[in-house]
Image: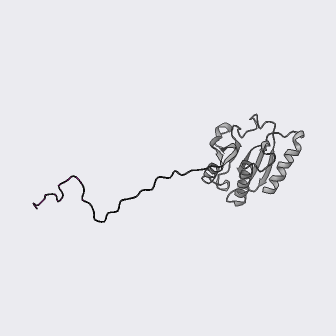
Amino acid sequence: MVEGEPVNKSDELPKVENEQPIETEPAIAELVVKHPLENKWTLWFYEQKSKVWEENIHEVASFDTVEDFWCLFNHIKRPSQLSYQCDYNYFKNGIKPMWEDGKNSAGGRWLLQLPPAKNNQHIDECWKNIILSIIGEIYDQSSEINGAIVNLRSKGTKIAVWTNNASKENGSNIMAIGYVKKLIW
């Protein structure tokens, strides 16, 4: 053999003794099943930076499955971690978290007033329970519910469930929502 001359003159690579053929399994497509919610929901975030309310509120994301809700919920700050003058708002898609929205204008709210939220895990737990109850539609009167808000202020925290019809004729439905809310909070 001449120095520098290739050992195998063919274009094929040399075979390794006892080489086993590599068996590949057919690719299995993973089926991802998501669990749909009855309604599509939107998370809004309010942070007071100006005197104009519309400049302070921002649509963050919408979701319509359980998995997409948890993806969002687990990646945002808890209410107790937010600065004062901030709000989270979960409303049915297409409804803005403001009384001037036509779907809120005839409605009302159930309100829970709590101490300031800073590092208060009880507020975080109440908020999570309320959100799960409204998006999971545990109320017999879920069609009456438009959304929920948590307001963080230095004087205290408010958690509210907004309804779409606060008329006297609808009083029994509104009271039923309040009764379930009382059990959750």
Which quadrant of the view contains residue 147? Answer: top right
Of residues 121 and 53, which is closer to you in this image? 121
Using the rendered image of the protein, determine whether residue 182 is visible from the camera's viewpoint. yes
Could you tell whether 50 is left or right of 101 in the image? left
On the image, the x and y values in percent for residue 59 come to 63, 41
Q: Quadrant of the C terminus?
A: bottom right
Look at the image and give the residue range highlighted in magenta: 1-14
Asked if residue 12 is among those painted magenta in the image, a careful observer would answer yes
Q: Quadrant of the N terminus?
A: bottom left
Image height of 169 relative to 135, above or below: above
Instruction: Kindly identify the residue that appears in the image at 25 percent across and 56 percent down.
Output: 13
Name the residue furthest top. Answer: 102
Instruction: Kindly identify the residue that appears in the image at 31 percent across and 65 percent down.
Output: 18
Using the rendered image of the protein, determine whether residue 185 is visible from the camera's viewpoint. no
Of residues 47 and 148, which is closer to you in this image? 148
Of residues 134 and 30, which is closer to you in this image? 30
